[in-house]
Image (tube, grey):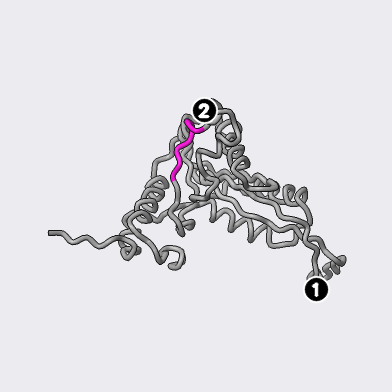
């Protein structure tokens, strides 16, 4: 964990409250009726090769020309349930309120239909609101989905608290560092990565506790004069 991630310049009691809330969620015991799921998103620029690469040969790596052609951008949504050793990626054209709402319905109806409640950790992006569901669905449907969600927001500048961001980092290193020409190819590549990660039961073991935060990040906490 890098220090610049942990100590935003405007850290205050609100930051501390949200940070401790998320940490406490991560240390809840496993409950199959209330799965913990982390949610995040990123974009991927698609680029086409201008010239055919030179293939690799013994003692020599393949060679790619530095020139490329931009071919649009896709959005990547990721769901990550660390206690289930499970993740799922959804590739979309955009990341609007409606796109977010459909992700939430997928989470409730497709990925965890038997769950009584889904404990969801995500950042405070402007689309990550219950109101987004009313933008996408009739009121009764929006309320049905909302009733299944228990949302815990990471604090501003505290995205390092979201374990889905760790999974996105792994995805970038293992899958997205190469040039990807179009969205169908992107969907194929991330699906293969997802299947491999899920089959190997890869996960994140979160060990940072509230007690650790109060010691290592004591500068985040407001000073209180005790009389």
Q: Position of residue 44 (x, y in %)?
A: 68, 56
- Left-right relation of 64 to 128: right
Q: Badge 2: few (under 14), some or many (20 or more) residues near its Cα, within 10 Å? A: few
Cα separation, mark 1 vs mark 2, equals 57 Å
- Left-right relation of 221 to 175: left
In this view of the protein, can residue 11 be seen by the observer? yes
Q: Identify the residue at horizontal 53%, vertical 45% (top origin).
A: 128
Q: Earlier in the sequence, mark 1 or mark 2?
A: 1
Q: Identify the residue at horizontal 86%, vertical 69% (top origin).
A: 54
Provide the residue span drawn in magenta: 146-152
Residue situated furthest left in the rendering: 227
Q: Residue 195 falls in which quadrant of the image?
A: top right
Q: Badge 1: few (under 14), some or many (20 or more) residues near its Cα, within 10 Å? A: few
Instruction: Relative to 219, say whether 83 is above or below.
Output: above
Q: Which residue is the site of mark 2?
A: 144
Q: Position of residue 134 (x, y in %)?
A: 55, 34
- Left-right relation of 50 to 97: right
Q: Nearer the viewer, residue 191 or 136?
A: 136
Q: In the structure shown, which secondary structural element does the residue marked by tag 1 occupy?
A: loop
Q: Nearer the viewer, residue 137 or 122?
A: 137
- Left-right relation of 99 to 70: left
Q: Nearer the viewer, residue 84 or 38?
A: 38
Q: Is residue 182 within the magenta segment?
A: no
Residue situated furthest bottom in the rendering: 59
């Amino acid at each position: 964990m890098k220090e610049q991630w942990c100590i935003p310049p405007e850290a205050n009691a609100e930051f501390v409250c949200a940070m401790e809330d998320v940490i406490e969620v991560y240390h809840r015991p496993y409950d199959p009726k209330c799965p913990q799921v982390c949610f995040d998103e990123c974009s991927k620029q698609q680029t086409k090769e201008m010239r055919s690469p030179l293939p690799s040969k013994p003692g020599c790596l393949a060679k790619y020309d530095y020139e490329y052609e931009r071919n649009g951008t896709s959005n990547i949504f990721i769901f990550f349930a660390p206690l289930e050793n499970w993740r799922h990626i959804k590739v979309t054209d955009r990341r609007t309120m409606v796109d977010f709402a459909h992700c939430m319905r997928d989470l409730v109806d497709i990925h965890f239909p038997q769950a009584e409640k889904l404990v969801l950790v995500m950042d405070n992006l402007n689309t990550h609101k219950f109101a987004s569901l009313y933008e996408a669905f009739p009121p009764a449907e929006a309320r049905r989905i909302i009733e299944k969600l228990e949302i815990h927001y990471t604090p501003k500048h505290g995205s390092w608290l979201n374990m889905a961001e760790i999974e996105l980092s792994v995805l970038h290193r293992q899958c997205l560092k190469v040039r990807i020409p179009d969205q169908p190819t992107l969907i194929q590549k991330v699906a293969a990565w997802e299947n491999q990660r899920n089959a190997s039961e890869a996960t994140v073991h979160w060990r940072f506790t509230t007690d650790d935060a109060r010691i290592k990040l004591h500068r985040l906490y407001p000073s209180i004069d005790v009389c």
